[in-house]
Amino acid sequence: MNDIPVLHVTGACLAEAYEKAVVELFRNGIAIRTQYDKPDDPASLDCTANITVLDPLAEPMIHKGFPGGIEDLREYVMEVAGAKDHWTKNMNDPADTRWEYTYHGRLIRYGAWRELRDGKSVQAGPFCVDQIEGVIAKLSKQSFTRQAQMITWMPNIDLDCYDPPCLQSIWYRITENDAGERRLSCNIRFRSNDAWNASFMNMFGFVMFNRDVIAKGIAERTGKPIKLGRLNWQADSYHIYGRDIAAARERLMNRLETSSFEDRTYILSDPDIREIYDEAEKTVREKIAEYDRTHPVA
């Protein structure tokens, strides 16, 4: 059988769900080539994945296995919140090599892009929809609606884009128990998700986005507290590139029998880790400012 397998994992916290997903991919994924392979690269490991995190803010939140640091997580959280939206290119300027989109930009300004007109950067597109405001308003008005969804895919651009958005949609719904506790459940779908280089940061970033933007916005508008419920992470292609398999095996798979889960994770609320995470914001803002100085926007 050479069909792409569909793999399911559930974890009590983010770090556990991530580790289970990578391990399951290693053990039951299929070998398949990708359009980004170099001639001598091994085939990737791939599957369709359904990853459920029962309590996205439960500790331990951070897995040490992903190839990045605490500072990288803080930077990605800021990126998902819009800190780099202005890094996108002028779409009709062939010399502009900046990003074609950001996830936050597609969510808050869906249907629009930047173009260079008469030497100035202007917003273009047939329409511009703030989907973030839309889902907050919809869920604040009717918590059990099934229509609170945001999308990123713009076929007029993305069908011919070299690196189109991996994130495809985010769906929300609120439940309430007999005690009146409200929880915000979320489904996030990626068409392609690099399990080793990107997936953990993607999940961490959108957990924080859900807490700091969506749940906070609903709570402020309704005057009622709301907690994050389960996160269901769906990836059409959940993969490890062949060139990364050895590193993933060394940093994670080979450590499963020689270390405890606690040794493979960080607790975000640990004072030392939290200090690194919080202090990284200044460094990230300086990095963004330096990029802005060297890549001025027309």
Image (cartoon, rainbow, N blue to C red):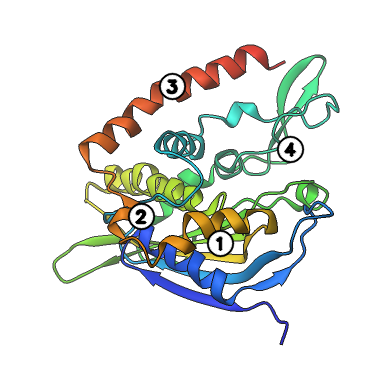
Mark 3 and mark 1: Cα distance apart in space? 31 Å
Q: Residue at x 58, y 43 (%)?
A: 103
In the picture of the structure, the residue carrying the numbered disc 4 is 125
Depth check, mark 3 against mark 2: the one in front is: 2
* Amino acid carrying mark 2 in the image: Arg
Is 183 displayed left or right of 292 in the figure? left
In the picture of the structure, the residue carrying the numbered disc 2 is 264
Q: Are marks 3 and 1 in contact (CB under 8 Å)?
A: no
Mark 2 and mark 1: Cα distance apart in space? 27 Å
Q: Residue at x 76, y 56 (%)?
A: 41
Residue 296 appears in the picture as rendered = no
- The spot of residue 50 in percent (x, y) is 51, 71
Is 291 displayed left or right of 75 in the figure? right
**In which quadrant of the rendered image does the C terminus lie?**
top right
Q: Farthest residue in the front direction?
A: 258
Label 4 element class: loop
Mark 2 and mark 4: Cα distance apart in space? 46 Å
Q: Residue at x 48, y 47 (%)?
A: 201
- Crowd rating for badge 1 (residues with CA inside 10 Å; few <14, some 14–19, many 20+): many
* Amino acid carrying mark 1 in the image: Arg
Q: Quadrant of residue 238?
A: bottom right
Name the mark on residue 283.
3
Name the mark on residue 217.
none
- Crowd rating for badge 4 (residues with CA inside 10 Å; few <14, some 14–19, many 20+): few
